[in-house]
Amino acid sequence: MQNTLSRGWHVKAKGGNIKQSLPAAVRRVRFTYICYMLYLAKTPWWLKKIYPSLTWDIPAHDREIYLTFDDGPHETATPFVLNLLKQYNAKATFFCIGSNVVKNPAIYGDMLLQGHTAGNHTYNHLNGWKTPDKDYIDNIALAAKPIHSGLFRPPYGRISRFQAKLLQQGSHPFKIIMWTVLSGDFDTGISPQQCLHNVTKHAKPGSIIVFHDSAKAYQRLAYALPRALDYFSKEGYIFKAVT
């Protein structure tokens, strides 16, 4: 599979390193490096430079880390996550799909009552690259009815510059939250151990880490999340929610 990301330079599949310096053509790359066939566990520095208006990490004043969970709420995965977070006195941010919030309102309510923050992840998990601008914005507005939040994360990390501008400059502007570290728990081709390694190797103070509270990710999530919480707790980290 060839895409904009892979032309002109080499990327080692499953989170490897760029082998050549960045070509000028990357300035024309459509927003985000992630593709579910080829992705990097750590956000490269140059992507942050190209899209500085998006939030890729949070300036840290201490050993603080930001866990985020996409695609819920899910009837099994989300309660599992909430129980674990409670054990570690950890706060997190859940980027929810609107239709899943409507389907699981009690779980969504528990999440908020426990002090976590919510973010909009569209109503139907839409890919911004493949969705007309008006339809995309309307779908986010539909999700905003059950999800009262000024935070947004685009599904698949795919959103056009124009769509991002519309969200950031609208009557109810969104803060677009991306990530520093991608656990890869959505990837059925990697082991749970690799998922954990992606997080513990790359996260540092101020990092925004992505997990998924979904059926697809659950096997890897169930292995990696408790171990990541234990690892970072022993390292003296505090788990905070994005606000």
Image (tube, rainbow, N blue to C red):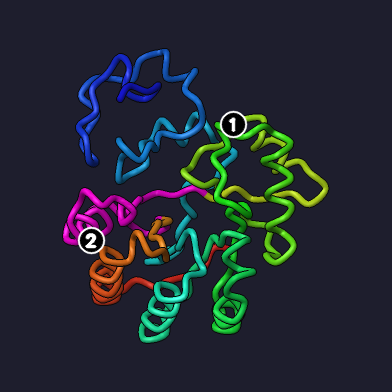
Left or right, 146 with reference to 237: right
Quarter of the image with the N terminus is: top left
Q: Nearer the viewer, residue 171 or 187?
A: 187
Image x and y of residue 232, in percent: 28, 70
Tag 1, which secondary structure?
A: loop
Q: In which quarter of the image is residue 19?
A: top left
The span picked out in magenta is 178-207
User: Which circle's residue, 1 or 2, is located before the other in the chain?
Assistant: 1
Residue under circle 2? 196
Image x and y of residue 193, in percent: 16, 60
Q: Residues within 10 Å of mark 1 (few under 14, many from 20)?
A: some
Q: Nearer the viewer, residue 103 or 73?
A: 103
Q: Tell me the residue at 49%/59% (across/down).
A: 71
Q: Nearer the viewer, residue 112 or 243?
A: 112
Image x and y of residue 150, in percent: 68, 57
Which numbered disc covers residue 160?
1
Image x and y of residue 82, in percent: 44, 79
Q: Tell me the residue at 27%/18% (across/down).
A: 9
